[in-house]
Amino acid sequence: MAIVQEIRIPTLSGSSEAPPIFDGTTRLYISYSCPFAQRVWITRNHKGLQEKIKLVPIDLQNKPAWYKEKVHPEGKVPSLEHDGKILVESIDLIKYIDANFEGPSLYPNDPAKKEFGEELIKYVDTLTKETFGSFKADPVTQTSAAYDYLENALGKFEDGPFFLGEFSLVDIAYITFVERFQLVLSEIYKHDITAGRPKLATWIEEINKNNAYKQTKPENPQEFVDFVKKRFLGQ
């Protein structure tokens, strides 16, 4: 499927005026650097909804006051403005967009795949917590079981290189964090998470061929490495 090539519009900051909220336009509020928001952005792109769902990038370091007042009381992203309401939480939003908008389905009908997909989506929080929690100690050892879990999960279905065979919401839920953790573990800890995990290596390679995903990749991936150094390592 051909993906519309979009030019990234400037982020809205403290001095930016609010869009005409609840005017009937469907808007996805994101940050270009946020892995949670990136999940929903990928979903929108893959389903070909660039004309139906307008992106509104927010500067999280200098948020406009109206964003907390009118959109998300906690000032977080992503948020989806649709049908006169605001919806939040990235996993809920990728499921919502897949179920309520046109475009190729991102979840299989096969009951076994559905069940395994839900199990995998629940596990993504374990992966992120274990990885973030390991940065101050020994991430290579402490995250080994989590990445082995992914390697084994990728062998469950053999009709494609993705978690459920075909590209799905499960892949979207994981890739935005795996891409960042892969870079951090390589740059700071000199560890390759794909070493001895050929299915994980192929999965990352195949997702990087997906234009819906490629358009959402951080323009400055080093930013996350610097965040980890500052937040967890005091550098």
Image: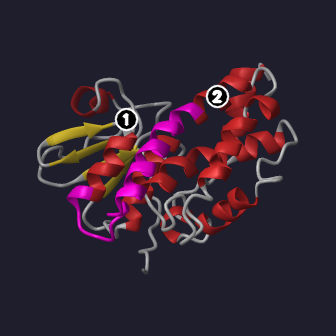
Q: In the rendering, at what x and y percent does residue 16 appear?
A: 35, 40
Q: Is residue 146 visible?
A: yes
Task: Examine the image and state in which quarter residue 48 appears.
Answer: bottom left
Is residue 137 left or right of 166 when viewed as pictured? right
Q: Please, what is the three-letter code of the amino acid marked with disc 2?
A: Glu
Q: Quadrant of residue 217?
A: bottom right
Q: Nearer the viewer, residue 103 or 81?
A: 103
| 28 and 149: which is toward the camera | 149
Q: Position of residue 131 (x, y in %)?
A: 67, 31
Task: Read off the magenta span.
Answer: 99-126
Position of residue 115 measured from the top left corner of the image (x, y, whole percent): 39, 49
Q: Position of residue 106 (x, y in %)?
A: 37, 62
Q: Secondary structure at mark 1?
A: loop
- Residue 195 vertical placement versus 47 (above, below): above
Residue density around tag 1, few if under 14, some if 14–19, many if 20 or more, within 10 Å: few
Mark 1 or mark 2, which is nearer the start of the sequence?
1
Q: Is residue 190 magenta?
A: no
The majority secondary structure of the magenta stretch comes to helix
Q: Residue at x 23, y 62 (%)?
A: 101
Instruction: Please name the colour scheme applied to the rendered image.
Output: secondary structure
**Above or below, 234 relative to 94:** above
What label sits on residue 130 in the rendered view? 2
Q: Which mark identifies residue 15?
A: 1
User: Would you say residue 220 is visible in this rendering?
Assistant: no
Instruction: Give left or right: position of 10 versus 227.
Output: left
- Is residue 231 rendered to the left or right of residue 210? right
Q: Amino acid at mark 1?
A: Ser
Q: Specify few, some or many for label 2: CA neighbours under 10 Å numbering under 14, 14-19, or 20 or more.
A: some
